[in-house]
Image (spheres, rainbow, N blue to C red):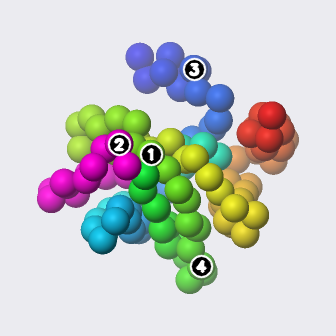
Amino acid sequence: MADAHNDKRRFTRVELALPVEVHQGGSVWHQHLIDISLNGVATDQPAEWDAQYNEPFTLMIALEDDREIELHAYLQHVEAGRLGFSVQHVDDANIAALRAVLEAHMDITLLEEELRLLSE
């Protein structure tokens, strides 16, 4: 069943275990990245989770080279200790960092194709 779900995705998800700070208003939750794509992020769910589901989030993903990727997203689903976010905005500085992360873990031709889809 997981394969059928993945076939419906437009963008390839790459599994990465990186720290993520999820911000909303004055709240910050320290979580771990499960996977990432050009338009989505999955994290683990913290034990204390009292977020406003209809309000935007800012996700700060800590990269291994002391840089961060900042993504603006909305929560799409909560299931089995996993939070799924839909990325709504990535600025130019952060798209370059996101692209570099994805390039290191997926086929460059596929990534270029997905970047074209993103810009449509």
Label 2 sits on residue? 54
Residue on which the image places disc 1: 74
Instruction: Give the secondary structure at mark 1.
Output: strand
Q: Is residue 104 visible?
A: no
User: Do the residues bearing badges 1 and 2 touch, measured as CB atoms within 8 Å?
Assistant: yes
Residue 44 visible in the snapshot: yes
Mark 4–mark 1 distance (CA, rounded to whole Å): 23 Å
* Outermost residue to the bottom: 66
Which amino acid type is marked by label 1? Tyr
Name the element at disc 4.
loop
- 107 relative position to 61: left or right: right
Instruction: Sort mark 1 into few (<14), some (14-19) or many (20+) by Cα contacts within 10 Å.
Output: many
Horizontal and vertical percent for residue 15? 51, 49
In magenta, the rendered stretch is 43-55
Residue, disc 4: 67
Task: From the top left corner, tell me how far across and down residue 88 is, in percent.
Answer: 57, 47
> Image quadrant of residue 29?
bottom left
Q: Quadrant of the C terminus?
A: top right
